[in-house]
Structure formats: structure tokens, C-alpha cells
Amino acid sequence: MSTVTAQADSYLRTRALGARDAARKLAATDPSVRDAALAAIATAMEAERDAIYAANTLDCEAASTLAAKGEIGEPLVARLDLRQGKFETALDMVQSVAAQPDPLWQTQRATELDDGLELFRVTVPIGVIGVIFESRPDALVQIAALCLKSGNAVLLKGGSEAAHSNRILADVIVRATEGIEGIPAGWLTLLETRGDVTEILGMDDAIDLIIPRGSKDFAAYVMANTKIPVTGHTDGVCHVYVDAAADFDKALRVAIDSKIQDVSTCCTEETLLVHADMAEGFLQRAIKELGEAKVLIRGDERVRALPGVNGQVEAATEEDWSAEYLDYVLSVKIVDSLEEAIDHINRFGSAHTDTIVTEDKAAATRFLQGVDSASVFVNASTRFADGYRYGLGAEIGISTGRLHSRGPVGLEGLTTYKYLLEGSGQIVDDYSGSDARPYTHKLLDRQWTRVS
């Protein structure tokens, strides 16, 4: 993978225009070609495991030094580390993406306009996608696999803390696909500096979509500085609500797993809401177990007034209710009703993932319908909000917006559609005037088929 030089302007523009050409070629490839490329990536990653680990170790050691100085948090160090199972997970995701049905040229709607005049709406790639993601090198692998399978070219910019890992992973992926006939050169480009990001934001003639993963402020910055469409994959202020009708043990498992299974992810629980009828006994136990897991609790006045929790709970501020900690910190609030819980989530949440624990099916339904988030669960950990766990193969991110795609974005979220009209010499004039032929507009139960 080439390194961006001082001539960044000409280099990046050339790469972006090359990505445009590569995307058009990828769109026309047979699915077996893209699947062969994904298999080659998995094989190459396994063969280069030691080299990848060595590069990743450099990033982790540098991050650990910063963490020891208090300049970054320990969860960020954990995000970087591929050596604790994340490498195997990344490999599994590449293979899972390859096993997904081909997302391209699928017929969404077929309509007969007239005898011998048939219209098909079929799925196609978006084109060239720029993805700016956090310091998670395994995310680079997921994003690359999804873009390749869906026929999109991609420009990738990861966090600087993962620079060594990102370079070698991008290099391994590009070299692995170079040997696959039909995979065009230039389908993947790694960006390395903030200046690179600034530059691509001005390339609305070459890039079709920007996906920023990170904070709400960063997504807002991107949107304000580009004409390119943006799908923001931003904050995860996720909630667990323990209802009055919750099963105690079930609620405890869900609340604790949602927080500590991996505190550095966007689908981690950041606020725990508990109905007043459950509060005393449940929170005494939950706060104890969370404390044993080194979770700092910030509670409202009612939580702090509970017997048996004195000294274990800091006072929550208004800012805590909308905070994405990505750390061993949890805000806790007591509510008096399901409606109060829903209102709190809709006011302070980020429309990411929220869950209710309850045995009351009517309450569950009200929660599912009332909470305005991309993913809403009943009796399940918020940590299930993940493209791989959803069966999407992997995810390019989790969208909290409303347009085009919501929640974990897999292959389907990386496609759009176009219309194909197949006729036999018809002209519009035949369907105009006093003796116009009528349109049949009959829905067809058939797929458009590609002839190789």
C-alpha cells in the first residue's frame, strides 16, 4: 500500500478517480469473483498473522504508554488489540460476509408496462465510499470485506493510534486481491492523515458517500464541510430499562452484560433505568456486582438515597444522562413508570440501541413502539446490536439516522437501485394521443436475469 506523500493533492485525486473506475468494474463482476477475493483475503490474513500481530503490538505498546500517563483510557487500548480474539473474529467475519447472498442485481420490483415492455428495479452498488473510523483495526477488515462483496470501492481512514495495524492489514488485503482475475486495482485506498480527510470531503465528483464513525460532533463537522451525502454512525447512548414486571435474575444478567461485556463499543449500556417498584432490592445487588467489575456508578438523588449504597454512588449531573462514556462508568436513574422511561430514552438517548427487561408483554410492546431508536430489544443485552450477531456477516457501522439504512449496516445498506427497461422497439408516441395504447402496469413475479 502506497504511503501518501507531500504531493497528497495529486495522489489522492488520482486514487479517488481510480476508485470510481474500479467501482464501475466491480459492479459488473460475477459474485463468484468477489467471493474468491474474500477467500483470498482470509487466507492471506492467516498467512500473515505473525506480521500483523507484530504491527499491532507496536500500536498497543504506544497506546499503553499513553494510558499509563493518563492521556487515553484503558478501553481504547483494548479496542486496538487484535491479539485477544479479535483477529479470529475478523477472519470469521470475512468468511461470514462471503457466505452471504449476493446483494447485487437482485430484483426488488418487476412491472410489465405493456406486452414486451418490462421494467425491473434492481440493486446496485453505491459506488465509491469514504469511511472514517475509530481506532479499531478489526473494523478495517469488516469494512473492506463488506465493500468488496457489495461491489463498492472504498477509501479508508482509521484512527492514528492504529496506524501500524491499518497499514499492514490494508496491504495484505490489497495484495491478496491483486491475484484474483476480475478484481480491479484501486478498489481500496488507505488514507493516513487528517489532511487526507479534509481533502476527500471536497471530492463530490468522485466519492458517492461518506460514513463517519465516531462522535456526534465529528459527524456534524463532516456534514458541514462536504457536499457528499453523509450517513453518520455516531454516539451510542444506550439504555437498559428494568420494568416493574421484570424477572430479577434476568434483569441482573442483562444489565451487567450490557455494561461490562465490552465497555468500548457503541452498543454498550451507558444508562440504567429502574422502575421504583424494583429499585431497592435490584439496585443494591446490581451496584454491588457492577462495583466488583470496577464500574463507577453515577446515580440520581433517589439512587443515592437507597439503603446500602452509601459511598458507592457518585452524584449524576444532567450531562451524565446524554454521555457516551465508552468506559467503566454507568449512570443510573429511578423512574416511576414505563412512560417516564420511554420519555427519558427519547430525550437523552442517541437513537442507537435500548432494551426493556419485563415479563409484561403489553409493556414490552409499548416500549418497542415508543422508543425511537434504530434497535429496540426485549429481555436481551444491548450488546447484541452488531452486524455479525444480526447475521449480516459484518457491519460497516451502526447508523442512528433514518434515511437509507438504520442500525447495523451490512451489505444491503451499501446498495442502492436502478431501473432497467427491456422493450421490443416501443416508443412513447405509441402511448400518446386519442388512439394511445394503454399501459398494463402489471406486477410480475419474476427476476431480472443477467446473461454472461
Image (tube, rainbow, N blue to C red):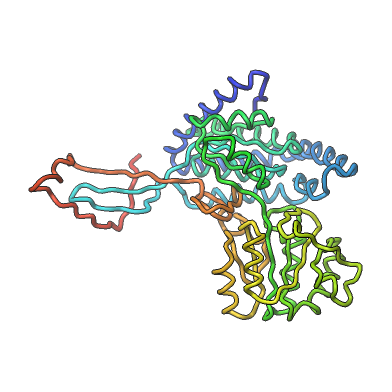
**Image location of residue 172, percent across then percent down:** 65, 34
User: Residue at the spot x=67%, y=81% of the render?
Assistant: 245
Q: Is residue 31 above or below residue 249?
A: above
Front-most of residues 218 and 255 = 218
**Image location of residue 60, percent across then percent down:** 81, 41
**Image location of residue 319, percent across then percent down:** 75, 56
Task: Name the quadrant of the N terminus.
Answer: top right
Q: How many marks?
A: 0
* The quarter of the displayed image where residue 271 is located: bottom right
User: Residue at the spot x=56%, y=36% of the render?
Assistant: 154
User: Residue at the spot x=35%, y=39% of the render?
Assistant: 452
Q: Is residue 301 above or below residue 418?
A: below
**Image location of residue 372, percent across then percent down:** 57, 62
In the displayed structure image, the side of residue 111 where residue 83 appears, left or right:
right
Front-most of residues 158 and 148 = 158
Front-most of residues 249 and 234 = 234
In the displayed structure image, the side of residue 68 where residue 401 appears, left or right:
left
